[in-house]
Structure formats: C-alpha cells, structure tokens
Amino acid sequence: MQSKVATWIGLSLRLFRRELGRGELTIIALSLILAVSSVMALSGITDRVEKSILVKSAEFLAADKDLISPIAIDKAYIEKAHQLNLKTDRHIYFSSMAFANDTMKLAVVKAVTEDYPLRGKLFVTMPDGMIDSKNVTENARESNYEAHGPKQGNTWISKRLYYALDKPAKIEVGDAVFNVAGIIDAEPDAPFQVFDSGTRIIMNIDDVPKTKVIQPGSRITYAGLFAGDESSLLEYENWITPQLKANQKFRGVKEGASGITSSLERAESFLMLAGVLGVILAATAVAVSTRLYSQRHLDSIAILKTLGASLKQVQVVYLFQLLMLSALSVVIGLFVGGLLQWVALESLSDFLPDELPALGMKPFLLATLTGFSCALMFSIPSLLKLFQVPPLRVLRRNLGDGLGNSKTAQLIMAITTFLLVWIYSQNLNLTMIVCLTGAVLSVLIVVFSKQLVKGCKAISSRSHNSALKLALASLQRRSKENASQMIGFTLAIMLVLTLYSLKNSIIQEWQDQIPVGAPNHFVINIADHELAMVKQRFAEQKIEPEQFYPVIRGRLTQINDEVLKQKRPDVVEDGAKFKGKKELHEEGDNNNRSDKDKADQEQDNESRVGFGRELNLTFTPTMPANNEIIEGEWMPSNKSKQVSVEAKVAERLKLKLGDSVSFLVGAQTVTAEVTS
C-alpha cells in the first residue's frame, strides 16, 4: 500500500514540475503570495506595536494607579495611602503660554515632585553647551541620562518646544522665570493626544504658586499617583472609591491607556480590513486559475481512470500538487510579508518606540491559515468537477464539460469568506455589513450578467461578423464563470472604495463641523484683572474679536431630582475583559443582592445618561450675536440662577423649560433653572 502511495506521489511530483511552466499554477502561486504577504505584513505591524504597548503598559501612568480630579487631592487620601505603605506622588496639569527669546508658545505644563516617576523611566537630553552648566546635577554630566522630577527653579521641556522657542536657556511661565535644565527624551506618562504631545513643560510642583497662573476658574487637573503591591492597592481602591465625587476618577493602567488601546484596536481592524482586499483578489484569482487548470486536465483524468486509477489515487495526485504549491507560496508570502512589515516599521520609526518586541506567532499563523484556506476552499468547485470526470470522456470529449459547481462548494466558499472577514476586522457588525453588501452586489451582478448574455444573443443573431459571433458565443457558453469573476473583482473594487471613503470621511466630517468663517485664533487664560489691558491692545492693533467669555469646567450631575449616570450601561471600557479580584468579588455579590437592590438597579438602568466628562460652561449677561433663541427667554430678570442650553444637548437629555440642572464645579454643586 505504501509503495502505491509513493508511486502516485512520485507521479504527482513529475506532473508538478512539468506544470510549473504553465500559466495557471503561476497565477495561483502569485495570488497566494499576495494574500499571505498582505496579511503577514499588516498583522505583523499591529502585533508588534500592540506587544510594545502591553510591555510598556505599567509606564503609562508613571504609577500603578492614579486619581484624577478637577480639585486638589484631599490630604486624607495621601495619608491613607502612606498607612498602606504605598508610594505616592502629586501632579498638577494646566496649559499656559511659555515665553523665551521674544517668542511665545502655548504649552502643557506638568508640575511634579522630585519622586516622579513612580513607575517607568524619565530620560532627559542635555542641550548643547549645557553639560557643564551649574544648573545640572552632579549625576547628570552626560548628554542623555535618567532623571527624576526637576528641582525648584529648573524645568524639562519637550524637544519641539525647545526649538520653537529658539533654544532658550531660560523660559518664562506666568510671572516666574525658570532654567531650561534639559530636553525631555522619553517620558513614561507622555500624553498621546495630538494637541498635547508637542509642547510640554515639566516643572517642580512647589514652583507653581510663584507662576500665579492658577486663578479662579482656571482649567486645572490634579492627579494623585500611587504605587505598591497588588493587595494594598486593592484595599486602597475599595476604601477610596465610595468617597470619590462624580468628577473624580480612580484609574488603573488599562483605564488610563484606554484611548491608546481603543485607537490601536481601530487601527488594527482598519488595516486587517485592508488585508481582506488582497485575500478577495487572491481568492478570485485562485478560483479562476483552478477552473482553467481543471478544464485542461479533464482529458488526463479520464485517461488515468481508464488505465485503472481509482478516485483516491487521482485525488492524491492533484491534491498533493495543490499542497506543494500552497506550501511553497505560503513560505514565499511569509518572507515577503515579513520584509514588508520591517520596511513599514522602519519608515515609521520616528513615531514608534525605540525597541519593538520580536514578531510573535500570531501573524505567521494568521497568514498561513489564510494561504491554505484560499488555496483549498476556493478551488473546491473546480477540483470536484475535475474528480467527477467519467472515464468515457476518452471516447466522448464533451462528457464532463457540463459538470457544474455544487451548492455545498458554493456554501463553503461563502462561509470561508465570512470567517476571514470576521477574523480580520474583529468586528461582527462590520463583517455583516461587508458581507451583506457583497451579497447584494453579487445578486445585482448575476442579474446584470444574465441581461448582458441576452443582449449578446440578440447582437449575435443580427451580426454578420464571424469573429464577433464566436466571441459572443464564448461569453454565453461561460456565463457562470464570467459572472463569478465579475463578482470577485467587483467586491475587490468595493473594498478599495470603502477604504478610500473611510480614510477621507474622518477628516471631512471634522471639517464639516466647523462653520465657514469660524475663528481660527484664540486667546485663553485671561485673568479678570488682565481683560481691560487685552481689550485695549486689540483696539490698538485694530483687531475686532468676538465676545469675551469667562469659562469654567463643570460636570452635569442631576436634572430635577434625577441623578444622571455618567456612563452608558452597554458601554464596556477598554480593559474591562480583564477581571481582577475586585470585579470577581462584585460579581459574586451581585448573585446575592436583595430584591430592593435589583429594583434600584433597574431604576438606575432607566435613568438618563450624562456626558461622563466636564463640560465647558460659559456665562455672559448679553446674548451672543451669533446665537438664536429657539424656545424660552434669554436670562429673564425675575430669575436668579438660570441657564441657556444648546438645542442638541437639550434634545439628548430631554430637557424642557423650567427644569433644574445641577453641576459639580470643583467641590461645589450649583443648581440653575433652564430658561431658554
């Protein structure tokens, strides 16, 4: 038995070497290489970046946990942390203008203690000519060194700010002047927002009062940082959580990096969806090539069967060829894909960490699965047709030509396509949209192709051109194959247009939200005593600004007697799938809740949902010229505390005239009536 199998495998190898010179196998091989390399490259990029983020995750907060608050952190919170042997740190975040060399730039200031960071490492680069400066500590006599929070009077600034201010030796923030003691090279908890990550200043927290930047109504964020063993952190979290106000948040690494994680997941889904384009093109090419290949081998199969070959022996010969071709194509595709992802990461090196983790097994497995799935699943119809050829074909050459694709084979191809799109997009809704759209397009193409064939028949009957008649007759004879090719290439074009549309729609939608002629320059952080001087300076420069608004931040917490939820119940934050002891303990408690607790939970689920963040609250005695009252009256004199609500906000929260709304502003609760 083994000798027979070896004989047929040897025959398969000889046929394979002979067939390599023909076009069908070359097209199949190139198609598989395209599919494997595109998936390998895209999944390799996202895999290495994701691993890098996970490796660096403990550094995202520069601590294990942090407490974010719009008001100063209560000293009792810090004392309790010390009782549990937790390391602590304090931060203050605010924006301010930075002045140097007759130049100014808006900068994000982070005031820290000298214990910063609790986790991760801060690296600082010394500016040219400053290594021997008196402002540099004795252990910082190198051009790049690991640092902690700056001492009083010194600052670290970002490279972009350093060059924007023309390489300053000193920098002015508010009423205080500081030495530029270094350039930030690597910051563990660096912001990832586009508008915060460029111009940054790190100063000592004890230097903040002398800047006189923090005034009533200033946009300030306070943070308490905590680091220690897991049990102490869990005990501290259980203690502090019930005491927090609605505008305070106690976060861990996963919650703190949620913006990065969600952005990475969306980018991965987008890139892998782009990989579907290569897969569909490859699947179409495999289906077409294997059909041509099987059509050419119908006579060979009939002869082999006439000579006594069984169906299994025929299957061994041709399936072994397909397996060898697939294996060779997958290996080449993995190499090409690995090379492409290396080139892509090198070109993006300025935006990525200095060291990325090694490539994992996930991209190799995903790309290999894709290659063999395309090779096998999309060649099934042609192979089934090939294996069903009767031996009598050697006498009657037309036998076997009419064997069509089985419904089972078509179902297998449809399921394979669905599963591949689902694996790549990692989003069931997106998969359903793509597949349903593809199904509708396929039906339309089939209907269109049938109408086209009917038109060809009419043209052929009237034409006297023999060449045209032959061409039209060929189209009619292969109408099903032509329709399948049109479906494949149309779906590929659809994906290209979808990706192009997605790429442009984000920027376009953002631009559409900005009215024509909207202001594009803003003056912020104007203290009340500086307003008259600012207005005078504008008048001297003949600048006519829009109305000046005092702005404060407040969180909407209550409408009438209804306390608003700050998050939708069906929204799961990034990292929620990772359950710790606290979450598991809460799940166990939920199973033993009383009926009253469950009733309260149901009522809470039906309550309105707030914004889950601080809102910008402006106030002015006169109605702005570019506003229009839709309903109500602008600030009637017989009302003391009142608000005018933007129409879309009122619609979302189901607000009506006369409702009372409560805001948590800092530590104070302010309640006002909706009058317009």
Image (cartoon, rainbow, N blue to C red):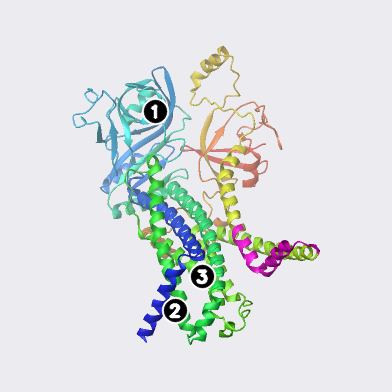
Q: Which of marks 3 and 1 is in front?
A: 3
Q: What residue type is labelled 2?
A: Val
At numbered mark 1, what does the secondary structure look like: helix, strand or loop? helix
Q: Which amino acid does label 3 sit on?
A: Met
| Cβ–Cβ under 8 Å for marks 2 and 1 | no
**Which disc, if any, is residue 161?**
1
Left or right: 205, with 408 as reference point: left
Instruction: Give the crowd class for mark 3: few <14, some 14-19, many >=20 residues within 10 Å.
Output: many
Viewport quadrant of the C terminus: top right
Instruction: Give the crowd class for mark 1: few <14, some 14-19, many >=20 residues within 10 Å.
Output: many
Which residue corresponds to mark 3?
A: 377
**Which picture quadrant has residue 327?**
bottom left
448 or 456: nearer the eye?
Answer: 456
Left or right: 48, with 382 as reference point: left
At numbered mark 3, what does the secondary structure look like: helix, strand or loop? helix
Which residue corresponds to mark 2?
A: 316
Q: Which of marks 3 and 2 is in front?
A: 2
Query: Residue 614 magenta-drawn?
Result: no
Magenta part, dominant SS: helix
Viewport quadrant of the N terminus: bottom left
Left or right: 464, with 270 as reference point: right
Q: Hey, which residue is sitting farthest right in the picture?
A: 462
The residue located at (51%, 70%) in the rendering is: 377
| Number of marks | 3
Q: What residue type is labelled 1?
A: Leu
The location of residue 251, given as percent across then percent down, is 39, 48
The span picked out in magenta is 462-489
* Mark-to-mark CA distance, 2 and 1: 68 Å
| Cβ–Cβ under 8 Å for marks 3 and 2 | no
Left or right: 273, with 329 as reference point: right
Residue 451 appears in the figure: yes
**Which picture quadrant has residue 108?**
top left
